[in-house]
Image (spheres, rainbow, N blue to C red):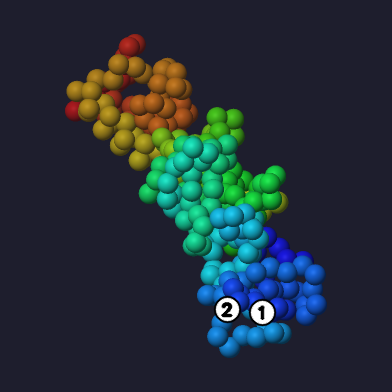
């Protein structure tokens, strides 16, 4: 079976002026054209050639000896060539750019920028790109608990947390309770593996272990207080939203760090705020 969107080895079963037809065997009924300019000089009837199958600008199934940057069901970072009326067009290493429909974009993309995408076959049997890569990510990573990994953020959920593709291919999540900081889709981050689930998915944290992170959080809080001339207009009873906006911390992390600073005599907590003690 000739598979759209995949590399496969096919046999030359017929030669014509404009190229050769390839099939799985000598007398195959299913065949696909490989244009003359891509036929190896030494190839002839019966020769086996590795090709990639896609559709050309006229929507015809065609073969190419060029290797695309991504295949069906895989993920990769691709560059946006232009944004049109139906979506964006991405460079995937072939003559015809691939479409990323608006409905498959998790954020509006910009020309000249790279995004993590997967390739799928749409209802019209055409290859398209999607930024909704969750189901395409692998769950067989080589990483274990406490390993440091690099990944790209591809989706942010208020309910679950921050979805990350480690090494652009492995499924990972920064749970909501660990999702401190101000992040956006497309950010490349370094994180610590906190758990490897039974299904192989990774749980991550961008924060250090608690006793180390507290010191860093405390220093950041002091720096922010200094920006407000040594007096913060709210204390540790502020809403989680205010704390997240000003410090990128959860309320619990904020209270732990403030407690550390209070114990060390570096701040004073008043009814209406926090004051730096020099």
Residue 69, visible in the rendered structure? yes
Of labels 1 and 2, the one closer to you: 1
Q: Residue at x 53, y 70 (%)?
A: 66
Of residue 221 and residue 166, the one placed in the foreground of this image is: 166
Q: Is residue 169 above or below residue 106?
A: below
Residue 169, visible in the rendered structure? no
Q: Quadrant of the N terminus?
A: bottom right
Q: Where is residue 269 drawn, in percent x and y?
A: 32, 18
Q: Is residue 73 above or below residue 25?
A: above
Of residue 47 and residue 72, the one placed in the foreground of this image is: 47
Distance between mark 1 and mark 2 Cα atoms: 10 Å
Q: Where is residue 179 drawn, in percent x and y?
A: 49, 36
Q: Secondary structure at mark 1?
A: strand
Asked whether the residues under the numbered discs 1 and 2 touch, taking CB atoms below 8 Å apart as contact, a structural biologist would say no
* Crowd around label 1: few <14 · some 14–19 · many ≥20 (10 Å): some
Residue highlighted by disc 2:
39
Q: Residue at x 57, y 36 (%)?
A: 103
Q: Secondary structure at mark 2?
A: loop
Pick out the residue farthest to the front.
17
Q: Which numbered disc covers residue 89?
A: none
Q: Residue at x 70, y 78 (%)?
A: 14
Q: Where is residue 228 drawn, in percent x and y?
A: 23, 23
Q: Quadrant of the C terminus?
A: top left
Q: Quadrant of residue 40?
A: bottom right
Q: Is residue 260 above or below residue 3?
A: above
Residue highlighted by disc 1:
15
Of residue 96 and residue 275, the one placed in the foreground of this image is: 96
Q: Where is residue 71 drawn, in percent x and y?
A: 60, 60
Q: Residue at x 46, y 41 (%)?
A: 84
Of residue 85 and residue 20, the one placed in the foreground of this image is: 20
């Amino acid at each position: 079976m000739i598979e759209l969107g995949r590399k496969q080895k096919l046999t030359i079963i017929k030669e014509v002026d404009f190229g050769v037809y390839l099939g799985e065997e000598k007398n195959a009924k299913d065949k696909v054209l490989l244009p003359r300019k891509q036929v190896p000089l030494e190839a002839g009837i019966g020769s086996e050639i590795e090709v990639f199958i896609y559709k050309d600008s006229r929507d015809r199934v065609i073969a190419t000896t060029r290797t695309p940057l991504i295949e069906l069901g895989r993920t990769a970072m691709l560059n946006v060539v232009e944004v049109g009326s139906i979506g964006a067009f991405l460079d995937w290493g072939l003559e015809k750019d691939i479409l990323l429909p608006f409905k498959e974009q998790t954020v509006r993309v910009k020309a000249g920028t790279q995004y993590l995408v997967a390739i799928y076959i749409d209802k019209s049997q055409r290859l398209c790109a999607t930024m909704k890569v969750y189901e395409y990510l692998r769950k067989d990573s080589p990483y274990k608990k406490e390993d440091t990994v690099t990944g790209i953020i591809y989706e942010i959920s208020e309910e679950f947390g921050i979805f990350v593709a480690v090494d652009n291919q492995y499924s990972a999540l920064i749970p909501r309770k660990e999702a401190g900081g101000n992040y956006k889709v497309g950010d490349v981050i370094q994180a610590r593996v906190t758990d490897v689930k039974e299904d192989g998915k990774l749980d991550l944290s961008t924060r250090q272990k608690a006793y180390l992170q507290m010191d860093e959080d405390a220093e950041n809080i002091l720096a922010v207080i200094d920006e407000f001339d040594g007096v913060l207009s709210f204390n540790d009873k502020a809403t989680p939203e205010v704390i997240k906006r000003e410090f990128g911390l959860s309320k619990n992390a904020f209270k732990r760090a403030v407690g550390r600073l209070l114990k060390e005599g570096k701040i004073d907590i008043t009814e209406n705020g926090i004051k730096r003690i020099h």
